[in-house]
Every structure is written in structure tokens, then in C-alpha cells.
Image (cartoon, helix red, strand yellow):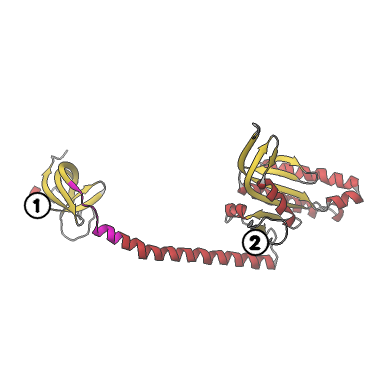
């Protein structure tokens, strides 16, 4: 039975881990605790910038919830950038490096904790990141592609024992090595060719089926009957309705569709080129008839007085 304090929702979950903390604590506990406190302060300052909700501390790491995958990734990038700048000014023994894993998935909010696959998978991909690196799942990658400047490279996590079957993992290339650049370019080119192939197939399908369907629709279109009179717009088809042709021919417009008229002539109603004539003004008419073969066959055509 679900507790009243439980809430299931979709969320982006970030899991962080401080590299080498356990070994450092065994060698120099005071230094380890000092760096841990600084680590927490740096991360929490950055989390505030991206509305990250710290769920809990895992000792030397944090479990954080975000409203969107993009916010989580942007926050992770800023964390690693801030730590990299900080480390440039510190001695080797005072370096702080972390790994970050991010997943977008279904979680259960129970009190102040989050449970479920969304949190579990984030925790399982974090060890796949390099020190100072970020790994994300396919679900996150699909949300951030082309929205962050850092390229992403797909990892082969199969057989690692870390990931469930079917969960793709990508790493963000923060400082690309030649191999990373090559892999990212290869992934980008593969995606471009895939997109191009989809576009070509869609164009071919449209040409084959779309035009044929249009031809069938045009040839078998249901003819509209107007046995009761209706009010339509009437004017010169070429001058006012931009229908094809070099002459001036009477046309009507009904429901946004324009038709040349059979059964009535443009000159029956005065000089078409007069100020209120069909070539210079759109008038209203009361008509009966039917549409047939793309034209309006008028049974009656009564021009209404100009307003």
C-alpha cells in the first residue's frame, strides 16, 4: 500500500562521488575531512545556481534532484569547471576530483528521500565517469543534444556489470582528447547521415504516396451541392483571388476555397473594371449550384448591393 507521503514523478537525478576519499581518509583523516567540507560547500553553492534540490549526502557524495535534464547537466558542467579552476591553485595532495552520473527517470519521493530506478541508475553510471568527468544515460542525452556546447561520446557499458540491459551511456567531453574528438565527430557524422536518410525516405514516401493520394482525392472529390442559396464572395478570379489565367473570369470564394464560375459571366454584372467592379472589389453574391471538377456550376447567381 502506497504511503500518503509517497509521490511518483519524472525527475533528473544527479549522483556525485569524491574520487579517492576513502584512501585519503585512511592516510590523513584531518585532511580528508577538511577537503570533504570544502567539497560540500563548492557543490552546494553551484546547486543553488541551477535550482538543484539536494536529497541527501552519501558521505563523500551527494544525491540531487533537478526539474529538467538540461539543468542537471549544466549544473554538472559548472561543478566540474569550478573544481578544475580550484585545483589549478592547489597542491597535489589538496586536489578535489569527483565523478558525476545523471539519469532522467521515474522516481518515488518518500519523505525526504527518492527511490526507484531513476535514482538507482544514476548511482550505477557515476562510477563509469572518469575523475573530473560526467556520464549521462540515453534518456538525458536525448534531452540535451545540441543544447550544450560539450560533445557527447557513447560508451560501451555492455558487460561492465554496472548497467541494466538496454540503458545507453554517454560521457560529456569536457576537455577533448584527440580520441574523444574523433569519436564525437564520428558519432555526429553518423547521426547526420541517419537524419539525412530519414529525410530522403520521407520525401520519397511523400512523392509516391502523397501525390498519388492527392490525385485520387482530386479525381474523386465529393461534389458539394448548394440547393439552398448561400452567400459567397464574388470577384475576378485572376485580379482578386489570384487564380491562374490571363483573362478576367468570374470566380467565387466559399469556406476559403476559390472556384471559377460556370453558368454566369463576369460582364453580366456591369463593367468589371469599374471602381466597384469585380476586378477592383470583392462583392457578395447569393448563389445556388454545386462544385464540380474544381469549378462552381451556378444554377442561380444574384449579385448583392455593394455596402
Q: How many marks?
A: 2
Indicate left or right for 285 with 105 as reference.
left
Q: Is residue 81 visible?
A: no
Picture residue at 69% right of the left edge, 34% below the top: 111
Picture residue at 82% right of the left edge, 43% below the top: 37
Picture residue at 61% right of the left edge, 41% below the top: 9
**Dot 1 crowding, Cα within 10 Å, few <14, some 14–19, many 20+:** some
Asked if the magenta segment contains residue 184, the reply would be no
Nearest to viewer (mark 2 / mark 1): 2
Q: Quadrant of residue 34?
A: top right
Q: Is residue 201 visible?
A: yes
In the picture of the structure, the residue carrying the numbered disc 2 is 154
The quarter of the image holding the N terminus is top right
Say above or below: 146 vs 66: below
**Dot 2 crowding, Cα within 10 Å, few <14, some 14–19, many 20+:** some
Place of residue 248 in the rendered image (x, y in percent of width and height, measured from the top left)? 15, 56
Secondary structure under tag 1 reads helix
Mark-to-mark CA distance, 2 and 1: 72 Å
Compare residues 232 and 223 and report the one nearer the observer: 223
Residue found at the far top of this picture: 4
Q: Which mark is residue 267?
A: 1
Say above or below: 55 vs 293: above
Asked if the magenta segment contains residue 217, the reply would be yes
Place of residue 56 in the rendered image (x, y in percent of width and height, measured from the top left)? 74, 40
Residue found at the far right of this picture: 27
Compare residues 147 and 124 and report the one nearer the observer: 124
Compare residues 217 and 40 and report the one nearer the observer: 217
Residues tagged 2 and 1 counted as in contact (Cβ below 8 A):
no
**Highlighted range, magenta:** 214-225
Amino acid at each position: 500500500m502506497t504511503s500518503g507521503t509517497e509521490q511518483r514523478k519524472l525527475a533528473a537525478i544527479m549522483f556525485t562521488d569524491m574520487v579517492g576519499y576513502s584512501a585519503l581518509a585512511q592516510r590523513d583523516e584531518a585532511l580528508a575531512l577538511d577537503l570533504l567540507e570544502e567539497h560540500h560547500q563548492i557543490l552546494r553553492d553551484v546547486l543553488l545556481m541551477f535550482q538543484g534540490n539536494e536529497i541527501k549526502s552519501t558521505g563523500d557524495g551527494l544525491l540531487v534532484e533537478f526539474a529538467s535534464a538540461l539543468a542537471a547537466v549544466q549544473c554538472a558542467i559548472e561543478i566540474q569547471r569550478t573544481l578544475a579552476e580550484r585545483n589549478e591553485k592547489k597542491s597535489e595532495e589538496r586536489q578535489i576530483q569527483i565523478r558525476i552520473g545523471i539519469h532522467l527517470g521515474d522516481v518515488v519521493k518518500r519523505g525526504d528521500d527518492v527511490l526507484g530506478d531513476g535514482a538507482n541508475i544514476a548511482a550505477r553510471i557515476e562510477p563509469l565517469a572518469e575523475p573530473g568527468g560526467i556520464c549521462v544515460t540515453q534518456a538525458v542525452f536525448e534531452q540535451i543534444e545540441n543544447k550544450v556546447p560539450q560533445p557527447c561520446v557513447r560508451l560501451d557499458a555492455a558487460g561492465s556489470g554496472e548497467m541494466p540491459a538496454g540503458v545507453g551511456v554517454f560521457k560529456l567531453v569536457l576537455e577533448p582528447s584527440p580520441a574523444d574528438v574523433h569519436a564525437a565527430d564520428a558519432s555526429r557524422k553518423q547521426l547526420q547521415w541517419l537524419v539525412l536518410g530519414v529525410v530522403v525516405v520521407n520525401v520519397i514516401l511523400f512523392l509516391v504516396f502523397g501525390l498519388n493520394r492527392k490525385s485520387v482525392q482530386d479525381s474523386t472529390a465529393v461534389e458539394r451541392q448548394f440547393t439552398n442559396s448561400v452567400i459567397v464572395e464574388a470577384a475576378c478570379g485572376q485580379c482578386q483571388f489570384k487564380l491562374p489565367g490571363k483573362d478576367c473570369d468570374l470566380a467565387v470564394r466559399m469556406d476559403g476555397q476559390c472556384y471559377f464560375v460556370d453558368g454566369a459571366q463576369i460582364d453580366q454584372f456591369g463593367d468589371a473594371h469599374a471602381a466597384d467592379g469585380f476586378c477592383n472589389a470583392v462583392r457578395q453574391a447569393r448563389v445556388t449550384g454545386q462544385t464540380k471538377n474544381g469549378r462552381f456550376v451556378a444554377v442561380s447567381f444574384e449579385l448583392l448591393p455593394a455596402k
